[in-house]
Amino acid sequence: MIDNITGYLRKLTELAVALLALAVVVQVVFGTAVPFLNVDVVGNLTKVIAALGSSGLVGLIAVAVLYAVLNKKA
């Protein structure tokens, strides 16, 4: 049962990352005035990256943990 839940969460995370990448590409191609995308995806990513960069070692550790979680194979 836990393996099923973990599998579903892994697939949901993969879907979220794919949608995020698609949103970035759409915003880069069409600019910030995309009618069906009401969020500034690139601006929000820039803020997150800046926050991680300004936090020094803690930000670096957070990025490493996220990288390990996203690249973990079942």
Image: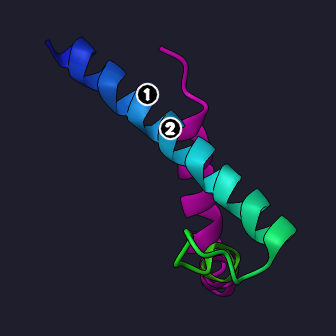
Alpha carbon separation for disc pair 2 and 1: 6 Å
Q: Is residue 62 above or below residue 47?
A: above
Badge 2 crowding class, 10 Å Cα cut-off, few under 14, some 14 to 19, many 20 or more, is few
**Left or right: 43 with respect to 2?**
right
Q: Residue farthest to the right?
A: 29
Prevailing SS of the magenta stretch: helix
Residue 39 sits above or below residue 24 on the image: below
Look at label 2 and name its amino acid: Leu
Q: Are marks 2 and 1 in contact (CB under 8 Å)?
A: yes
Residue 28 spot, x, y in % from top left: 83, 69
Would residue 8 be found to the left or right of residue 12 on screen?
Answer: left
Which residue matches tag 1?
A: 11
Instruction: Residue at 57%, 48% (x, y): give it.
Output: 19
User: Which is more toward the observer, 56 or 33?
Assistant: 33
Identity of the amino acid at label 1? Lys
Mark linked to residue 68: none
Query: Percent x, y for residue 25?
Result: 78, 58
Q: Quadrant of residue 70?
A: top right
Residue count near mark 1 (Cα–Cα under 10 Å), binned few <14, some 14–19, many ≥20:
few
**Residue 62 sits inside the magenta stretch:** yes
Find disc 2 in the rendering and name its residue.
Answer: 15
The residue positioned 61% from the left and 81% from the top of the image is 40
Frontmost residue, 16 versus 7: 16
Local secondary structure at mark 2: helix
Residue 38 position, x and y percent, is: 52, 78
The magenta span reads 47-74
Residue at screen point 40% across, 35% down:
12
Q: Who's the residue at 81% across and 71% down the image? A: 30
